[in-house]
Amino acid sequence: MRRLSITDEDFESKFARIVNDRRESDDNVASDVRGIIDQVRQKGDDALVDYTMRYDKHALTADLASWRIGADQCKVAYDMLLPDVREALDMAAERIRAYHEGQLPENRDYTDAKNVRLGARWSAVEAAGMYVPGGRAAYPSSLLMNAIPAKVAGVERLVVTTPTPGGKMNDLVLAAAHVAGVDEMWRIGGAQAVAALAFGTQRIRPVDVITGPGNAYVAEAKRQLYGVVGIDMVAGPSEILVIADNQNDPDWIAADLLSQAEHDPSSQSILITDDAAYAAAVEDAVDVLLSQLSTERTATESWDKHGVVIVVEDLLQQAPALADRLAAEHVQLALNNAEEMFARLRHAGSVFLGRYTPEAVGDYVAGPNHVLPTGRRARFASGLSVLDFMKRTSFISLDEGALDAIGPAAAALAEIEGLPAHARSVTVRLK
């Protein structure tokens, strides 16, 4: 963990290194993924069989059950949940669905002063693929956050790929698939699953959009296949920025910081406060809590390698500029004047306002999507929404009078650009 003070002479250089630090895939990962994609494109199912045995120790055989998880299995997994877990899953799904229904865009259709009819029609993609991690990061919440917006958008065919290491399936993920209304579920993981969704294989039909979190190989596969399919984003390791004054219980803020550190050794947790003594108290609370976590090893590595505590002189005046340079995935404002601070922030994936709004609530039941831009991409990108599963088609309609009104200008511009056929296609229709 690094401690910085804004009054240090070398603060700017140290902070710049934190801002520019890349905790994402390297050239070796890119090369390996390129090879996997090529094999899946050329060999289809045979490549999936090889990679699934190699990486997941799961045999894909002639038996379809070794490839697919049926809707009946998902229903059984849902029915077997403990009542409180089922209620929590249902509540999360209901709140996520309600929030995303409010994102549905409206079509436009109007006629302007020249009697030209103009507009745009929104429609869902035909098929969407979701990657749901297995192993360390088998999260039913991720399935809900990806699948429900797709269904709200109107996607007809919703396909999930998820690894089943050693043949073991995650019942909570299966239950979430039932709640979200997933249409197909394939027992395949890694970059090979992303390639299969993009190109299709003998068994798996291709999709139009691929979303969902994954390891560095999955993220790199999505990056390389963008253009073949649409993607939500290239996601890197998770991150949280907590801006807190000394009126918070240090134990609360320690838990907030470690809520992201426990995701992955490459995750990053940053605290900005205006009290050095309080910063030390939070650091002590982190040390105590780490020893109590079942995820201690992962969280400790993340905190030791990437954790940062920054002490400033004036939170309201200095923290927003620092936060905007970090452009963090999650920004938590544990302050009395959280709204005032929020008004000064420009770049953040999602913001959590007030002392009683831990980021973890947003991961599960608040409603907004927890699939958010990482690696400073919040400067230009947004969290997953229904729009990631939709496209807009514009339309134009002119009658003879409307063409007479605007056609000559189109022809003139076409001639200026040296495109006479463009001009001709307009002028032959003019009076």
Image (cartoon, rainbow, N blue to C red):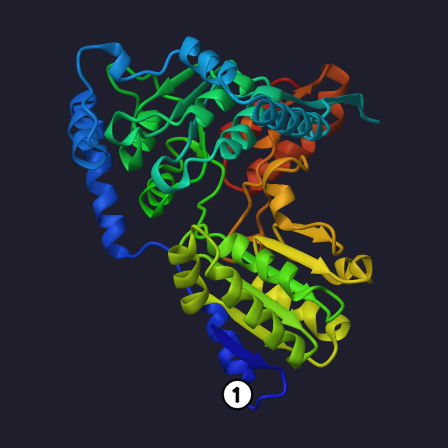
Q: Is residue 40 above or below residue 124?
A: below
Image quadrant in which you'd find residue 265: bottom left
Relative to 217, is 9 on the left or the right?
right
User: Can the viewer see residue 346 in this picture?
Assistant: no
Which of 415/163 is in front? 163
Residue under pointer 1? 10
> Which amino acid does the dot numbered 1 rest on?
Asp
Which residue occupies 68% across, 29% down? 95
Which residue occupies 60% across, 61% down? 241
Image quadrant in which you'd find residue 24: bottom left
Which of 165/131 is in front? 165
Residue 381 in the image: x percent, y percent?
57, 48
Relative to 119, is 185 on the left or the right?
left
Q: Which quadrant is home to the C terminus?
A: top right
Which residue occupies 62% across, 32% down? 411
- Number of numbered discs visible in the structure rendering: 1
Residue 130 in the image: x percent, y percent?
44, 28
User: Can the viewer see residue 24 in this picture?
Assistant: yes
Image quadrant in which you'd find residue 12: bottom right
Q: Is residue 194 above or below residue 429?
A: below
Which residue occupies 30% across, 21% down? 200
Which of 12/426 is in front? 12
Residue 235 in the image: x percent, y percent?
45, 47
Residue that protrudes farthest toward the right in the picture: 113
Residue 350 in the image: x percent, y percent?
64, 49
Relative to 350, is 264 on the left or the right?
left
The kind of secondary structure element at disc 1 is loop
Which of 51/291 is in front? 291
